[in-house]
Amino acid sequence: MNHNQTYRLSTFWIAVGITVLAVLLLAAGADAASDQSGNRVWDESKNLSTNYTWNAYSFSGFYYNLDDNLSTEELSINNINPAARAIAEGDMTYKTSPIEVDFVYSPFGSYQVIGFMADKYFAGYTGNSTISKNKEMSTIAGGQLQRVLFDDEDRRVVTVGGTLTLQDGYVLKMREIDIGAGPGQIFIVLLKNGAEVDSSVVAGGGTYIYTKRVGSVSDLPIIAVHFESVFRGTEVNAAFVRGVFQISDSYTKVSSGDRYGIMEITGAGADQITMNNRNSIDLSGGSSIDLMGNLKLIVADNSSVLRFALSVERTGTFDVRGTIYPVTNEWTPLNFGLNIGSTSIGLFYDMDKDIGTEKLTVNPSGASIPEGALVYSTSPQEISFDFSDFGSYQVIGFMADKYFAGYTANTMPPNPTTRVAEKSALAQGQLHKVLIDDETQRTISVGGTLTLKEGYVLKATDIDLRARTMLLTLLKDGNEVDTTPLSAGQTYVYTKRVGAVSDLPIIIARFDNVFSGTEVQAAFIKGVFQISESITSVKSGDRYGQMRISSVSAAGIEMDNPNSVGISPASTVDLMGNIKFRVADSGDVRFYPVVTVVPEMLANQLIIDAPTRATAGDAITIKVTAGGAAIEGASVAVDSGIGQTDITGTLSYTLPKTLNGTYNITATKLGYQRATRTIDVAGFIENRLSIDAPAKADQFGTITIKVTFNGAPVSGAGVAYDNVSIGQTDSSGSLNYTLETGGTHTISASKSGYVTAARDIEVRLPFSEFRALDINITPPVVSTGETTVIRSNITNAGTKRDTLPVVLIVNSTEIDNRSVTLAPGEVKEVNFTYKATLPEGNYSVAILGQSALLEVVKKRPQRE
């Protein structure tokens, strides 16, 4: 049996297995989902199997092809032992296999794709790939995977002298058109980073294919562009493009023995990749463990119950989906969501406290959901404040977001300036966003401030050391709104009327103590809580998208659809809030709920970049970011407080010689979500060298490796990379090295008279991926000859900083472009001014996948 027959057969059995699973789950009910990998969270209190598997149904990060109903990745853990709170070496297994999928432009046939470490990769061409002239070319068999950069069938018009902008620096330029007999011909030139790399003549109806050697694979087609037809008019000569496919000319290496994070490839071939954990994994409460690539394991900060889930660390725009219908027709936080750090995406779920009640049920009929067949419910739950001395309050998930619902009899801040009475905002038909819920101790010196949200600032106006009191002033947008003296141990409570609720506490802050030094007088504040003074209305009859609130009370909210909802193939249905249904382009009814994550959703989630392994006495660098931006003034702790990040978001720290074991690095900042990362620290060894090198770096990039002893540089130290010598350090103790291969590698340093040091580095294949978050046309209606301004916010969803063209396409024709430089996760607005030259009609305007309509009307008569 050849490879192609094998893949077709495996695809058939995957589809059969999915169908059987769907029947079993719907027959057995929602509870059975947890036994069939339906839950994304493993929880010892829910009687789940101690041998557990996540796949594309239970973990949104794994690759899934909705149209063809295919997935490739699964991760299993065997012998889960809550008492030991550890995963033994070899008990975590990851498997993925290539599958054959259709090109979006169907005449190209099909090719192999594979999910790897929660990302999509190209795995090879098959006997059904016309791009490879139906020749099988398995890149996975050659130990390499590549990113799919383009796979579309959009119609584009390229005029003579114009360009078709691809990715990885490639640009296709139309140099000349020859309209003679037959379909006509186009003379095209391919540029890479501005330099010509290929030229060809392609006939109308033909396909341009560019091949090159990539790694071990010769003559690999990396670009295919189909020219549908050629047009030559009296004023315009143009080629019509329909069908573009491109893969990266860089690759990720996958060979047996390669390491990625704590995982090692134990098998790699044309049919499958398998990986196992090469060390035991500690599951201490609050841990965040880097498994491989962007894949993480996060553990609930709960000492009484072991609860953990898979997660991913991504920037830019990406989707978080729920389990697929018809595998289930009911979604809860356990099968529709993702916890990224302390941020919940999808149906709200607090994993530390097992809080979350949102539920969505659907009963479609064919390609529509009848009136009343889409039912949503949610109810408030009592949750403790992060600063536990405040007691607890009511929280509620609503339309995949977290809201404050009310104070309860258990809301008891110590010694409050104003008593916090039991109040249900929900019962009054309103909800509030929780802006700050923080327990970190913070210092305010006299005249200093503590910046809150929505324009509020707390200011320490004066401190009376004898009376141990502080005069606290509250400012709103720079204006004083409240002043009160506070004694040590007292809690400041600021109330105001918000909507229908009078005297609602919106800010709570505890004044802990007073410090008097020789130069500084300061107050300590520990425990800050703030809710928004803007309200979200939740009253019977309120409409949100396709849904209407049918009932609301202090006990909860219920919604249903007052009209039928169409779920036609290949559609995306805006359901309510950020929740949508994405429907398969298939004759079968298949869809899933989805939340598209944009950078703003994670702008307040801190992320820590630091080594995963080190030795006591090592100097390490810790970097804290949020939404791709460096965070200055974040408080960082390794077991206990160690300092704050500088303007670059970094903190250099020498691990105490007393450390030995697994520790959590935590980062906090007021108004941001806490971040945690686990580091394994080996015991201190006398006379051992130290290595200062990045924990993560991009493939093909050059890093500086510095070797020190007791903080002093060591010259003449021999440095090895995966046990292969790469040179010696110079007089400053440094050595520069270019990283050629991806994966996890070991840097070691040795010198006579010293103990050898070693450190791991994770090398990632760098890529840039620009995406448009929106598109806006002002004005959207113009007459011929008038101008309009087109704006779009562009983000880089990749891993490297890059400068790429952002192209404006009007009526399938590339009109203009802007060169934009973006760091990973960065967002910039791009503006185009377009003068309409088209006749009357409605025209598509597109930027990087986002599109809108421009209406061109008759030229308006000029007023006399």
Image: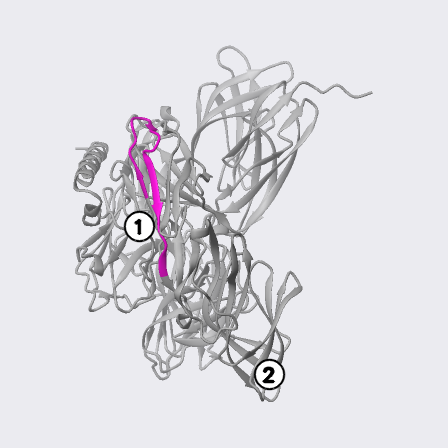
**Could you tell me residue 24's position as x and y percent?**
17, 39
Left/right placement of residue 458 relative to residue 691 reads right
Q: Give the position of the N terminus as an image quadrant.
A: top left
Against 706, residue 13 (above or below) is: above
Residue 521 image label? 2
Amino acid type of the residue that numbered disc 1 sits on in the rendered structure: Val
The magenta stretch spans residue 374: yes
From this viewpoint, which residue is outermost toward the top?
Answer: 181
Amino acid type of the residue that numbered disc 2 sits on in the rendered structure: Gln
Mark with earlier residue (1, 2)? 1
The residue at the point 57 percent across, 21 percent down is 238
**Could you tell me residue 512's position as x and y percent?**
49, 78
**Could you tell me residue 326's position as x and y percent?**
26, 36
Residue bounds of the magenta highlight: 360-382
Q: Which residue is mark 1?
A: 254
* Callout 1 touching callout 2 (CB < 8 Å): no
The residue at the point 75 percent across, 18 percent down is 861
